[in-house]
Image (tube, helix red, strand yellow):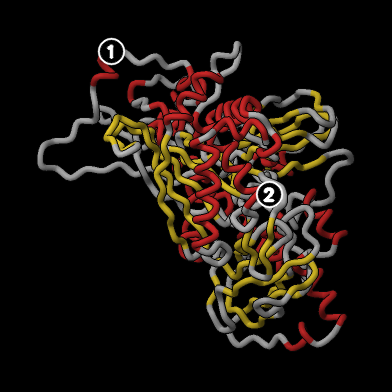
Amino acid sequence: MAEVINMPRLSDTMEEGTVATWLKKVGDKIEEGDILAEIETDKATMEFESFNEGYLLHIGIQEGDTAKVDTLLAVIGDEGEDISSLLSGDASVEKSDAKTETTDEVKAISDEETSASTDELPEGVIVVTMPRLSDTMEEGTVATWLKKVGDEIEEGDILAEIETDKATMEFESFQSGTLLEIGLNEGESAKVDALLAIIGPKGTDVSSIAKNFKPAGSAPKEDAKPEPKKEAPKVEAKQEAVKKETPKPATSNTSATSTSDGGRIFASPLAKKMAEEKGINLSQVSGSGENGRIVKKDIENFTPSAQATSLGKFVPSGQEDFDEIPNSNMRKAIAKNLAKSKFSAPHYYLNVEFDMENAMAFRVQYNSIPDVKISYNDMIVKACALALKQHPQVNSQWFDDRMQLNNHVHIGVAVAVPDGLLVPVVKFANEQSLTQIGAAVKEYAGKARSKKLALDEMEGSTFTVSNLGMFGIDSFTSIINQPNSAILSVGNIVEKPVVKNGQIVVGHTMQLCLACDHRTVDGATGAQFLQTLKGYIENPVTMLVQ
């Protein structure tokens, strides 16, 4: 039977969406999980995947067209199926809306119902699902539960810490009651809208709700069936399939690493990830979880022995060997966003070398002030902010239908973390002092490494600085952090012979590379920005009078 797919609500503030690209065409076979289209929302362009299987029979919104949420987007059904009745009038549209549960009333109910086959929830019972904590989040991992079953919950209480593709964030309750059920244990991952917890009156039996719960995304296949007797087997079959699939994450979430005596090591995903970040060999860790499973606290409390730290993985000579590491949510997001930037934005690069003698002397004098300490990176961020105010073209952003010249300066500072890269944003950097910038960067870097950055601390950058000088890198190029128009790569300060006043003397220089998007920043514009930046870096006292 044909299924109507409507324009989805991909963010809480989304009221309409634009189809940026169709990745399938009419007649294509669709599998559950296939990406149907890229949809531009009010916040980002996001991939929209199918929760149905069949053939794409109709496209309701063409590429570049915009429509309100719940407008007919596509129809999926059996090959050659007649869908004229679905497209012929308001009555059929209302019918299809009922099938896909896109009216506000049905959607509100579906968020709280456990499945098509369950009755209404008991009074006061609320099903809490895995939230979408960022526009790019597709699944989340429960890092820590801050409440346990039986605890009284007040509105605003923090229920858990959830790891997304960008950060570990606190998730607060919007309901009051008793925590009756926990759907995901610490370290377990699940898709957005999966069962996270159930809250309700103390003593309420919610075992059947938890057992039969299905995410809202699968509801179109189950609900609004005109002939319940015919559809019931499908629901039962689907429930059975879910039950069969449930153990799979559990087995994939345990480590299959073998010990020296041939035994298997069982560990939660979070424990494996933490062990990887800390370089801990799981075979040396004793698990305190069920059946000896290694959990988060085992990694946190692990103290390696001298023998364990000195031994690496044994690989026989002449034997090929490798380890497979599942891609984290953050790594997937990095791959997607940077690949999109690299292959959609025409990058070009401008390389310069600055004399750092005055900057080095200035930093020594500035840091002689009691309780003050700034880094070279703080000076570069401040200099960039002042230079960007004079060159708004470099402080611009590219969108498909317009170019935005920003009058404010928000500078993203790339921070390396064990699992990838985060870019916290120093907002209104041109208005902040060097010490304020230094304090902000230090705070954000600490939050980034502990995965405590809030979403608003990573959004809104108009320019980005990436510094690998502290790692001894002399020069490198970076990929633009879209929709920004440029990113500055900062290298190490190098002691080398330089020519001054016709004499060869010992000097200190630093190489920088400005990557620009040619759609917004022409070569001469980028060069003029670097000239202004050079003035501030080589004469840093001028930054104090701005």
Image position of 38 with respect to 492: above or below: below
Residue 228 at least partly seen: no
The first of marks 1 and 2 along the sequence is 2
Name the kind of residue labelled 2 in the image: Asp
x then y, percent, for residue 76: 64, 76
| Quarter of the figure that contains the C terminus | top right
Q: Is residue 414 left or right of residue 16?
A: left
Q: Residue furthest left?
A: 318
Return the residue at label 1: 306
Residue ID at (65%, 77%): 63
Return the residue at label 2: 193
x then y, percent, for residue 136: 61, 52
Q: Is residue 251 left or right of residue 79?
A: left
Name the kind of residue labelled 1 in the image: Ala
Q: Is residue 107 left or right of residue 507?
A: right
Mark 1 residue element: helix
Where on the picture, by quarter, is residue 429? top right
Image position of 541 with respect to 34: above or below: above
